[in-house]
């Protein structure tokens, strides 16, 4: 196993294993979001499992970044309010301009992340026992909240052209239900995933450097969490709905899946910390460093290029097409690195091209 504390080298703080996992999250996300528009059903179960890991990894790492900004950069609460608001603004523009739906109704992933940034900051102000109590409460209360509020087969999506008609029909209660528990990434339990990331960040980053997760203790916790999650998920798998062609297994996100995903991510951290930094593939770190920009760009490509084709491919052709798509995102990441190098002091550039 690796040493417990890894020193930070260079003028800029970089945690290359985290960059690697962010890149993996981007790759999984691009593949998962392309499936409804390009892959001929049925989708193999292994691909459904891999696709299901993109969102929890993406959300957990966003929560970890809050801890990093608090620990290493001493950011104030106002910073997270502004940054969270800008993420929500990007999410709203993406839904309105790209997908042509009323923004914020179905609680997509960027809305959840934007909401979680200031809440994660406040969360970290609490004593550790209270923080773990909140995490346990969110996990345990999710099935109860789903039962009380109801979990719809499809989240609410309202075309821009149908806004006034939907307003007349009174869509607000359904939208509130989607934000609480029924949407794409509602507060229960996905806010808990972001807060778990913030908690892991306080363990990961110290004043002395980076605490390696490649230890026997962390590996044991990871395997115990993974096995417990698998057992609970098998006993209570949930409905595993397919929503608008999206085949992830977390519709709805049952506690067993949440534990399974947390165990997988912890195992990924252990493995990533065992990889020498010099051997971490550059494409993953580059794409992970501009994840927001790639998220926006890949959504536009899917909505404006892939979806209008109406083309469904068999699995081998799909995998080849997605590989080319991901290579294109890597090329964009290289371009964004150049832009960041020349105009990196501008806040908008750092916001879009830096995380």
Image (cartoon, helix red, strand yellow):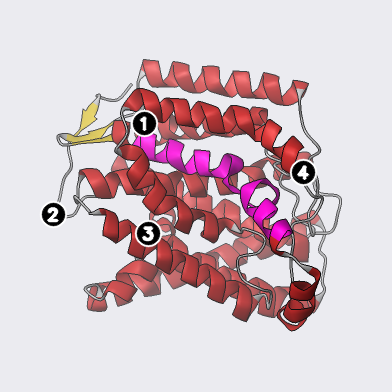
Q: Earlier in the sequence, mark 4 or mark 3?
A: 4
Query: 160 above or below 326?
Result: below
* Span of residues in magenta: 173-201
Q: CA distance from mark 2 to mark 4?
A: 50 Å
In the image shown, does 1 or 169 lie closer to the viewer? 169
Q: Which residue is mark 1?
A: 274
Q: Is residue 16 visible?
A: no
Front disc: 2 or 4: 4
Give residue 42's position: percent from left, percent from top: 86, 50
Q: Earlier in the sequence, mark 2 or mark 3?
A: 2
Q: Residues within 10 Å of mark 4 (few under 14, many from 20)?
A: some
Front disc: 4 or 3: 4
Q: Residues within 10 Å of mark 1 (few under 14, many from 20)?
A: some
Q: Are marks 3 and 1 in contact (CB under 8 Å)?
A: no
Q: Which residue is mark 2?
A: 11
Q: Earlier in the sequence, mark 2 or mark 1?
A: 2
Query: 345 above or below 77?
Result: below
Q: Which mark is residue 289?
A: 3
Front disc: 2 or 1: 2
Q: Quadrant of the C terminus?
A: bottom left
Q: Residues within 10 Å of mark 2 (few under 14, many from 20)?
A: few
Q: CA distance from mark 4 to mark 3?
A: 37 Å
In the image shown, does 85 or 164 lie closer to the viewer? 164
Q: CA distance from mark 4 to mark 1?
A: 43 Å
Q: CA distance from mark 2 to mark 3?
A: 17 Å
Give residue 157's position: percent from left, percent from top: 74, 66
Q: Main secondary structure of the magenta part?
A: helix
Front disc: 3 or 1: 3
Q: Are marks 4 and 3 in contact (CB under 8 Å)?
A: no
Q: Which residue is mark 4?
A: 150
């Amino acid at each position: 196993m690796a040493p417990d504390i890894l020193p930070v080298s260079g003028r800029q703080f970089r945690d290359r294993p985290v960059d690697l996992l962010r890149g993996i999250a981007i790759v999984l996300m691009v593949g998962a979001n392309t499936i409804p528009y390009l892959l001929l059903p049925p989708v193999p179960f292994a691909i459904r499992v891999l696709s299901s890991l993109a969102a929890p990894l993406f959300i957990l790492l966003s929560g970890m970044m809050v801890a990093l900004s608090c620990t290493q950069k001493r950011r104030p609460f106002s910073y997270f309010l502004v940054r969270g608001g800008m993420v929500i603004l990007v999410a709203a523009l993406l839904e309105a301009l790209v997908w042509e739906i009323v923004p914020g109704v179905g609680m997509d992933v960027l809305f959840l992340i934007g909401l979680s940034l200031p809440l994660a900051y406040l969360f970290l102000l609490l004593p550790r026992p209270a923080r773990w109590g909140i995490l346990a409460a969110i996990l345990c209360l999710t099935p109860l909240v789903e039962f009380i509020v109801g979990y719809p087969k499809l989240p609410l999506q309202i075309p821009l052209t149908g806004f006034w008609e939907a307003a007349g029909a009174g869509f607000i209660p359904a939208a509130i239900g989607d934000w609480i528990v029924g949407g794409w990434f509602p507060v229960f339990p996905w806010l808990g995933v972001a807060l778990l990331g913030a908690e892991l960040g306080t363990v990961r980053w110290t004043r002395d450097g980076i605490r390696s997760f490649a230890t026997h203790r962390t590996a044991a916790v990871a395997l115990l969490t993974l096995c417990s999650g698998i057992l609970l998920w098998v006993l209570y798998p949930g409905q595993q709905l397919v929503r608008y062609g999206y085949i992830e297994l977390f519709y709805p996100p049952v506690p067993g899946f949440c534990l399974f995903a947390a165990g997988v991510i912890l195992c990924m951290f252990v493995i990533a910390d065992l990889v020498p930094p010099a051997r971490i593939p550059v494409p993953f770190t580059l794409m992970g460093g501009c994840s927001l920009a790639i998220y926006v760009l890949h959504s536009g490509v899917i909505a404006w290029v892939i979806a209008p084709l109406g083309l469904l491919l068999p699995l081998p052709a799909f995998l080849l097409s997605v590989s080319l798509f991901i290579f294109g995102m890597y090329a964009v990441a290289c371009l964004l690195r150049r832009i960041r190098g020349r105009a990196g002091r501008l806040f908008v550039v750092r916001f879009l091209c830096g995380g």
